[in-house]
Image: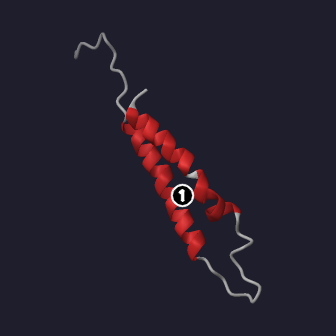
Amino acid sequence: MNSKKIIGFLCWALSLIPFQYALLNTDTVVHADGSADNVKGLISFVAFLLLIFMGYLFVDSASSKAPAAEHGH
């Protein structure tokens, strides 16, 4: 397996860490006094998107094997 694909899959696996705070754990965003703390959720969401797209770029840019009988006609 190509090293770029491995790095891409690791980025996708690591994106599960900020996914919890970005999209799943929204109950702790609003405090008891009604004030909101959206900074942690925003940073987690940006990190989540960054890891997803970086993983895509690494997997997509990994060289695939060219057909052996390519003639160029």
User: Dividing the image into 4 quarters, which one contains the C terminus?
Assistant: top left
Dot 1: element: helix
Left or right of residue 39: residue 34: right
- Image-based side of 10 in relation to 61, left or right: right
Q: Residue furthest bottom?
A: 33
47 vs 62, left or right, is right
Which residue is depicted at the point 66% across and 83% down?
36
Quarter of the figure with residue 28: bottom right
Quadrant, the N terminus: top left
Q: Quadrant of residue 18?
A: bottom right
At 56% from the left and 76% from the top, the residue drawn is 39
Residue 5, percent from left and from top: 43, 35
Q: Residue furthest left?
A: 72
Q: Position of residue 45 (x, y in %)?
A: 56, 64
**Amino acid carrying mark 1 in the image:** Phe
Q: Residue at x 22, y 17 (%)?
A: 72
Residue 58 coordinates in the image, percent (x, y): 40, 41
Residue underneath mark 1: 48
